Amino acid sequence: MSLIFMDGFDHYTNTKANYKGWTFHGTYNTFGSYGRFGSGGVRTTYHDQVVKRNIGVNKSTLYMGIALAKWEAGTPIFDVRYPLITFWDELDVKQVVFCISPTYQILAYQGDDTLLGTSAVDILKDYVWCYLELKVVISATVGVVEVRVNGVEIINETGLDTKNGTDYIRSLAFSAIPSQRTVYYDDFYIDDSQFHGDCRIKTFMPDSDSATHTDFTRSTGSNDYECVDESDPTDDTDYIYANTVGDISTFGITTGTLGTVKGIQLNNYLRKDDAGTRKIKPLIRSNSSDYQGTELDDVPANYIFYSDIWETDPDDSNAWTQTKLEAAEFGLEITT
């Protein structure tokens, strides 16, 4: 396994964030148009704002990358460190915490108290986006914390005791710094084997119907894709639906010019509307062949985003390109 999850925060807003698997605390709008390239993004304004995600699997080694910017200039009026990124185990015990100091250093701690590593001062600049990458290995004897900013290593400590709870990481969070120093976040990934460098997570909505798979019924209109093309889902306002095992619907996308594609994540937004077990598999149609993803065991009655990742084109196991993505189709199949 490699890529576990990615998010550009472009296809939902605050009210849908929990459907995507995020939990957050605080009294201010968090998800919206706060991104570094003009869309998506997360805003945290006060130190009690925390945006958290369960990654869905236990990992002893985890890499993550995220773009961030602190957007309030001025001399800090706080005189203690505050958590910026936190890694928890499956029992919700803090394993490793990356803090920001009054001199805008990044400090790594086991739990809340044991210092593991320190960067130089002024790592985070006012009004400047940077790309922060972290590596954590949980171990009582051979733990690792590594921090990179814009590809430059600023902390690399090995042979550590990073184990404050169990042997694993299960969830992580990012948060604000105090004194109304707003921090924006965007372009987030988690991986279990490598850094990916400064990445942009782009979101593409369906813009054409399949030439092959159109088993689902549209609720309104003349094109199926028009019922599923909203960048913030409209729930039961317009949608496609089906109730027969084996039904498939897929859609085309237009990406425009792309750089190197590290992987794609197919996000299906769905629910069931009756009792009983219903299962689905994400599906990609590439080069006239269908490739199923990981099955969702039981579709819930409330809306959720269900995501699956393909790092390469399943048809030839080579990297995705603009040509391949625009020739492929993306959707789902009812399996139970």
Image (cartoon, rainbow, N blue to C red):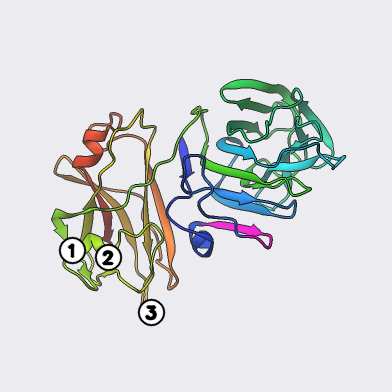
Q: What kind of element bears circle 3?
A: loop
- In the displayed structure, would residue 33 be above or below residue 151? below
The residue furthest front is 74
Q: Residue at x 28, y 57 (%)?
A: 332
Which residue is labeled 3 in the image?
A: 275
Please state if 9 lies on the left or on the right of 23 as rendered.
left
Q: Residue 266, percent across and down?
A: 35, 49
Q: Earlier in the sequence, mark 2 or mark 3?
A: 2
Q: Residue 55, can we see it?
A: yes
Please state if 14 lies on the left or on the right of 88 as rendered.
left
Q: Residue 140, percent across and down?
A: 74, 32
- Give the extent of the magenta segment: 21-28
Which residue is labeled 1 in the image?
A: 223
The CA span between labels 3 and 1 is: 29 Å
Q: Which kind of residue does numbered mark 3 sit on?
A: Ala
Are there few (<14), some (14-19), or many (20+) residues within 10 Å of tag 3? few
Q: Earlier in the sequence, mark 3 or mark 1?
A: 1
Q: Residue at x 41, y 65 (%)?
A: 298
Q: Which kind of residue does numbered mark 1 sit on?
A: Asn
Q: Residue at x 69, y 54 (%)?
A: 49
Q: Which kind of residue does numbered mark 2 sit on?
A: Cys
The CA span between labels 2 and 3 is: 24 Å
Mark in the foreground, 2 or 3: 2
Q: What kind of element bears circle 2?
A: helix
